[in-house]
Amino acid sequence: MTDRRTELAANLAKVEERIAAACAAAGREREEVTLIVVTKTYPASDVRLLHELGVRHVAENRDQDAAPKAAACADLNLHWHFVGQLQTNKVRSVASYADVVQSVDRLKLVSALSAAAVRAERELGCLVQVALDAESGKQGARGGVAPDGIEELAAAIADSPGLRLGGLMTVAPLAGPYAGRQQAAFERLMEFSSRLRVAHPAANMVSAGMSADLEQAVAAGATHVRVGTAVLGVRPRLG
């Protein structure tokens, strides 16, 4: 466990250096960017070590892994982010531990999250996941709503009891006009964020960038980056 702690500490330090350098290059303060460590496929023991090392935001993308992990770490001061595509039959479970659901991409999910949050007497932060590879009215290959659906979803979240509209999230697309153009994709997301904040000034969270492209996300103006591999190592293959 000592070796694992040392490994995680070294990896965190490298990621911290990258974020700090990206902020400096962009003329931003380091405090403007929050690191979310994506702990999917890794055990609760790693989450505990990360907490010891100062991490306060962690993310998961599968409820069947996240729910027991969150329960095992319930005594820790952590903010749990759900970042995967979410089925409505998992909403009640996710609403019991998640602080933020970053992958809201359809109206049916908004109503389900609202009902679950009210039942659990909790407030859930929600981000609209934007698919920059999706055509009008469609969803992206990795989840997310087409850009022309942002306004409707954001309004629905803002008007739903138990939910708080936090902002926007995207994953750099693998296809379409922004494939291989991460910074352009993230800059486009920032444009959508600026428009959203006209009607919803408090919805200022912009979640973008992962291990391979966090610098581009910081340069574009992201407020949160989601880093897994660079902190925890190459993930084991899922069976």
Image (spheres, rainbow, N blue to C red):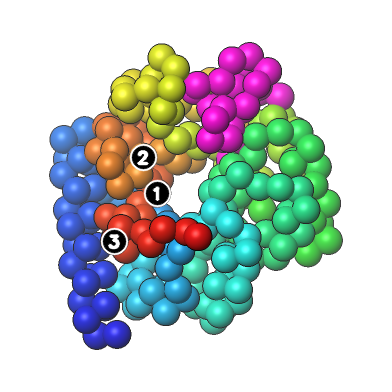
Whichever of callouts 3 and 2 sits on the residue coming sooner in the sequence is 2
Q: The N terminus is located in which quarter?
A: bottom left
> Mark 2 falls on what kind of element?
loop
Q: Residue at horizontal 53%, vertical 35%? A: 142
> Mark 1 falls on what kind of element?
strand
Where residue 130 sits, quadrant-wise, is top right
Label 1 crowd bin: few (<14), some (14–19), many (20+), radius 10 Å: many
Location of mark 2 (residue):
209
Q: Position of residue 164 (x, y in %)?
A: 66, 45
The mark found on residue 233 in the picture is 3
Residue 189 vs residue 123, the one in the foreground: 189
Q: Give the CA separation, mark 1 to mark 3.
A: 14 Å
Q: Residue at horizontal 45%, vertical 41%? A: 207
Q: Main secondary structure of the magenta part?
A: loop
Residue 128 vs residue 161, the one in the foreground: 128
Q: Position of residue 116 (x, y in %)?
A: 79, 56
Where residue 48 sits, quadrant-wise, is bottom left
Whichever of callouts 1 and 3 sits on the residue coming sooner in the sequence is 1
Of all residues, the one furthest to the front in this rendering is 239
Q: Is residue 130 magenta?
A: yes
Residue type at mark 2 is Gly
* Residue 162 visible in the picture: no
Q: Check whether the beta carbons of the residues at disc 1 and disc 2 lie within 8 A of each other.
A: yes
Is residue 159 shown left or right of residue 100?
right
Q: Check whether the beta carbons of the residues at disc 1 and disc 3 lie within 8 A of each other.
A: no
The mark found on residue 226 in the picture is 1
Question: From which residue to which does the magenta span run?
Answer: 127-152
